[in-house]
Amino acid sequence: MEKKLMETFQKLYGGEGDIRTFFSPGRVNLIGEHTDYNGGHVFPCALTLGTYGIARKRNDRKIRFYSDNFSGLGVMETSLDDLVPSPAAKWTNYPKGVIWAFEKKGYSIAQGMDVLVYGNIPNGSGLSSSASLEVLTGVILKDLFDIEISMQDIALIGQYSENHYNGCNCGIMDQFAVAMGKKDCAVFLDTNTLQYEYATVKLEDAKIVITNSKVKHSLVDSAYNDRRRESETALKDLQKVVDIRTLGDLTEEEFEIHKDAIGDEICKKRAKHAVYENQRTIRAVKALKENDIAGFGRLMNQSHISLRDDYEVSCEEIDILVDLAWKINGVVGSRITGGGFGGCTVSIVKNDAVETFVEQVGKGYKEQTGHEAEFYVVEIGDGARRL
């Protein structure tokens, strides 16, 4: 793969100079959805799928981008003096946003660069191709320009650029998982304090299977920002009666005592999900540490029900995939993963049931929706790095 990409890079940009290769993973969140901007816990892991980048410094201020995934767009050119988002910039708004954010945060980028990227994360699948590209850009800048910056700060810059440059009000989870991932481990992250620990995910006789619905409803960004607003409204109402900074500060019992302070019924449902999902995530990590994989799976299932009914970020196609999965012997747990309204499910499936799972879920999904699902049996890999 790297050899082929290097040949493309040299053909496009010439072969001289110090050319460097990088990799940034995608991520899947095992449990803890829509808790990251509500001050709760998340439990994502980095994947061995991701985004490759090849880059070289230039002597002027020009930046040239090429994506092997969108080869029809050719080389897209901009400069350090033109870091403004625009529809015409298409996918390059993500790396441009990170360069802009580095400068905003006081890091000097004085020269341009030639960049080629190629990702094997399916687009729009909810496996964080955008965060992967953002963190990749951060790692390239750190390496090419000898910038003293931690991986955690690269994650925060990626989030900052997505919030303030690309206009999606995302939490920190995606960029953090991509930057800080570790092989065979998921990251148990308290998004309120950024304290984290690695928990080993050693599934002796099971695999993590991601199922791509191949559906992406255009709702995702607008509804995402709506859910944030609804959660914030609920928090403000609760703060009138209980001393909390985030919804993640509440236990389920405390929420039940104070929930009637929330004036709006829809906001109440959103808050319920945020509180209960946070507690589920804490319990799920405990279950995993105790090697209680069945308990972990039950919590994944409950997470899906809450995301479907209380947070309302699922959709018909995803619910069909989850219902089909739940019917199969050997499925430990299955739920929607990512922002919602399409994208993927994540399932833990016993080794001897993986083939049946792919066959039956694929067949049932095609019959009920007319869409072909895609399946990836994934490995947990390391975070973003120079190769």
Image (tube, grey):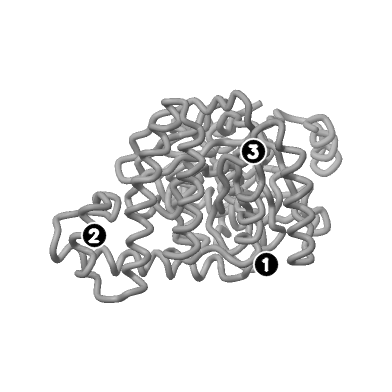
Q: How far apart are marks 3 and 2 (CA)?
A: 35 Å
Which image quarter is the C terminus in?
top right
* Nearest to N terminus: mark 3 or mark 2: 2
Most foreground residue, 371 or 71? 371
- Location of residue 240 in the rendering, given as x and y in whole percent from the top left corner: 14, 66
Q: Which residue is drawn at 62% across and 45% down?
A: 112
Q: How far apart are marks 2 and 1 (CA)?
A: 48 Å
Looking at the picture, which amino acid does disc 2 mark? Glu
Task: Pinpoint residue 372: horizontal percent, then vertical percent.
Answer: 79, 58
Q: What element carries label 2?
A: helix
The answer, for residue 53, to whether it is visible in the render is no
x, y percent for residue 118? 74, 43
Q: Could you say which is closer to the camera, residue 132 or residue 45? A: 45
Give the labeled residue for mark 2. Answer: 256
Q: Which mark is residue 88?
A: 1
Whether residue 316 sits left or right of residue 67 in the image: it is left
Q: Which residue in the protein does label 3 denote?
A: 330
Q: Residue 266, which numbered label? A: none
At label 3, the amino acid type is: Gly
In space, the residues marked 1 and 3 are separated at their CA atoms by 47 Å
Q: Do the residues labelled 3 and 2 touch (CB within 8 Å)?
A: no
The residue positioned 53% from the left and 66% from the top of the image is: 221
Q: Which of marks 1 and 3 is nearer the N terminus?
A: 1
In the image, residue 163 sits, relative to residue 12, either above or below, namely below
The kind of secondary structure element at disc 3 is loop
